[in-house]
Amino acid sequence: MNLTDFGLAAARLALGRREFSARDLTLAHLAAIEALNRRLNAFITVTAEQALAQAAAADAALAKGEGGPLAGIPLAIKDIFCTAGIRTTAASRILGPFVPPYESAVTANLRRDGAVFLGKTNLDEFAMGSSTTSSAFGSTENPWKRRQDPEIRLVPGGSSGGSAAAVAAHLALGATGTDTGGSIRQPASFCGIAGIKPTYGRCSRFGVVAFASSLDHPGPFGRSVEDCAILLRSMAGHDPRDSTSVDVPVPDYPAACARGIRGLRVGVPREYRVEGMAGEIEEMWQSGLGWLREAGATIVDVSLPHTKYGLPTYYIVAPAEASSNLARYDGVRYGLRVPGEDLIDLYERTRGEGFGAEVKRRILMGTYVLSAGYYDAYYLKAQKVRALILKDFTDAFAEVDALLAPTAPSAAFAEGEKTEDPVTMYLNDVFTVPADLAGVPAISVPAGLDADGLPLGLQVIGPPFGEEVVFTVAAALERAAGFAALPAIRAGSPRT
Amino acid sequence: MSYRIEGRDGEWEVVVGMEVHAQVVSNAKLFSGASTAFGAPPNSQVSIVDAAFPGMLPVINRECVAQAVRTGLGLNAEINLVSRFDRKNYFYADLPPGYQISQYQHPLVGSGALAIELADGTSKDIGITRLHLEQDAGKSLHDQHAEKSLIDLNRAGVALMEIVSEPDIRSPEEAGAYLRKLRTILRYLGTCDGNMEEGSLRADVNVSVRRPGEPLRTRCEVKNVNSVRFVMQAVEAEARRQIAVWEEGGAVEQETRLFDPARFETRSMRSKEEAHDYRYFPDPDLVPLTLDPAWIEELRAALPELPDAKKARFMAEYGLSAYDASQLVAEAPTAAYFETLARGRRPKTVANFMLGDISAALNRLGHSFASTPLFTTKATGALLDMIEDGTINGRIAKQVIEEMEVSGEGAEAIVERLGLRQVTDTAAIEAAVAEVLARESAKVAEFRAGKEKLFGFFVGQVMKAMGGKGNPALVNDMLKRKLS
Amino acid sequence: MPLDILTVRRIARLARLRLEDSEIERLRQELGGILAWVEMLDELDVTGVPPMTGAVAMALKMRPDLVTEGGNPEIVLGNAPERIGDFYAVPKVVE
Ligand SMILES: [Mg+2]
Ligand SMILES: [Zn+2]
């Protein structure tokens, strides 16, 4: 068996038994990256030297029978997590050659547990997007191909598209992502892997380049639900450096994956049945409900009446916060500087040239909705609707343990599709955005293929800090779905 | 009597409100672990949070909150159990994140009041609208380099309390008294060092004028005035400017101005005139600040005695005049100095001596009751005791103080070395009296003919003859006896 | 509500973004479209609904008043595009 074909949990077991070394595992992944990244563009920066040093440390620990839960596990890190001494770009020109002198809390936790960092993955600039096409470092290609049209370049989803593509193509055993409006779950769905956005406050935002502070959720990708559980257990935890980090113990998530779902009540939010949704997605959703019913869960119809207001609410709140969060990129202390006649000119040129079109659009939108005379009509109103959306979830979780819904309204689309009109592009996030607004945990699990042979994901949403029930239901779904398809482009595949 | 400015055609009343920015006394900054110490090398007290590096987040300093609560309690203000931090968005080179974290909508402290005392002996309450916590900006140096401005972020993120008054102030004197009293209270509480030269206390003065009895007119904000004297001058200068505008048929425009003390005038801050739109919104990196009422009570219980209470007690307990008591309580160390000395001595004598000869000496030395190494309570106490037990008289005491300033010796050593002990020997006094009366026989005749005010002249002459060392009471007695 | 060019310029100025003339018209249309779309929220009556300012309901945690950072200007100056000594340098600001 090819070393890149191991799952995370299996690889960790094999490493512990010294069936192969962390160095071998790392070299195999670096070789795969070397072979495929030129095409996929999943990584912005590959840190081979660092990876081998971390692998050596892991081997030393493993040889002594020690080593953390992730000792020797090669991971890909979304290039929005600051990594000490390693360039961090957020896929923007404006960060220029920025090398942070500090480490994000999440990546520090992964290091603590022995992980090996292969490199930094591509994303939509500042995580603003659903396709990983707005990166200053070029777009990332989805390793999956339409059966009848394998030449078309599909998007991996976004914004964490580089991480999702890397895990799907077996370039890494797992990856980190951030989910602000769906940026973990939607690319997981598009790339046929699992990805969880935990409860807001579960993973520290310290050292994560901010997009929208009240919506940014760091979380993991894995090729299985259990892999996600293992990664999240390491990533999560209270961090006194983040005032929104919650001081709640981290449960044993992997253990939750093995539990049965008999007696659990799973809700079907009727408002997620939107007009124009592909028939295949509706069918897969029904299959998912059937699997859960067979496994002993009770399926209940529930209502989240404000679902359709999620997207417009999100497109007020997120740009507003972003317009303020991105004010720090001014060419004074780090990153790109474009000289100007005076300070204001320097600011305007630096930001005008440093930010891409989508980022500028959102900064302008956010500036507008906060500006004098518009605050109440847009921002304040959106905050109130956000409260109603949260209440929808609170009411639903009074009746059910978890919700099941599709992750995205379509499978991966082609680069260039849906890009003329921003609103059309935004509609991609219709099913993922509400959980971000409410801050509740949600996972995407690959559940089947569409007629083109592209993966489709189902989403399990839980109550705040209900990650365990989310993992339990998702693992049951995963077992029933038996999803075994592989992307056309992957390490060791004949096409490569 | 209320303050009025005489215009070209009638009287005008001045209406003033103040916003004071007071730097909070704390070790670390409001939202980071960098030091607040003054005068450090550039950018040596800057954390990656203060410099707004990507992914950096604010975490509030508990002591800064405690200091703001103490100040609120000291101003008899309501403490809001829930308050919140907002972002005030604007671009400036010394504002790294592009926003200031401040409390716009929901401040930590609500309305309170502060009593000021005026020269005519009356006092007046000035309303406090609110007090909130916010971050200071860094410093831009514009005059160090030909083409560049240099940025030092040492101050960036230091906690400030913005204390906003009601427009209750009606004269330059009240404005000065308000700022002085506020500074006194902050210093008593230890929540701000009140050092205006170092910028720990800065006042923005809002001035408008109106005909007596009229509603309020447009106000202008005179920014960053950095001394009590300049605040008083700025009020007057700005009021006179506005009166002139109105009386010429113009209209005062709401704007921000700067006071130029050298020219005794305010001028518009044209460079800041670009329309501001701060786009305030709740800082999503922070959650609401909720205070435990028990903690507030703990802070309240630990508050020191404040100047108004201390003044009342000094008057009641020590029988001091309102004026002396005010003077003594203006600084907490002065009041403590007084209380140490007053123990076992006559309080009025102690007050007179402190506010008279000792204050004069401290002024000459540039010292204060808190800082003087020379006039410690022990040294001053010894001097007072020598007056009290008749070793020296008040006049000699003055000479001893002057000698202490020069030689740094203690009072007793000086008295011994210079032989300044008071003469109480009646024979010596009688001899000096006899000598003076013999020499001044003409004046003695005048005195006996009814010109009684010459008595002081004879006292002076006798004291002079005795080198100032005569016991004044004995000299008086002897003179009275010999002249009758 | 359709946006006009002047508003786009004013907002861009506020956000310190230099826009090419070609970008402005495109942005005017796109932003106008997004604003028209979000007006969907006007269907809802939110009277009396308290605004949700964040996704986590807890009290603000406070740090002790300890100096734990700073002391090394290189950490904050190391990435500076321009510095003079231990200062950041920017074009001279005339006040
Ligand atoms: Mg102000
Ligand atoms: Zn202020």
Image: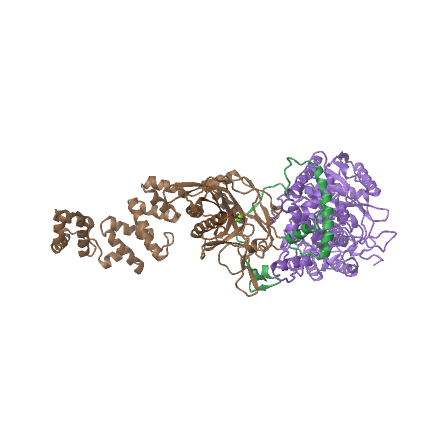
With respect to residue B94, does B174 lie above or below? Answer: above
Query: The N terminus of chain B appears in which quarter of the rendering?
Result: top left
Q: Which chain, by letter, is purple?
A: A
Give the image location of residue A99, x and y in percent: 65, 60
Q: Which chain, by letter, is green?
A: C
Give the image location of residue B198, x and y in percent: 47, 55
Whether residue B344 is visible, yes or no, is: no
Of A444 and B213, the residue lying toward us: B213
Of A401 and B246, the residue lying toward us: B246
Query: Which colour style is shown?
Result: by chain
Give the image location of residue A364, x and y in percent: 68, 51
Of B411 and A441, the residue lying toward us: B411
Whether residue B331 is visible, yes or no, is: yes
Spot the residue most to the bottom. Answer: B146
Spot the residue most to the right. Answer: A148
Which tint is chain B? brown
With respect to residue B121, does B471 lie above or below? Answer: below
Give the image location of residue A404, x and y in percent: 76, 40
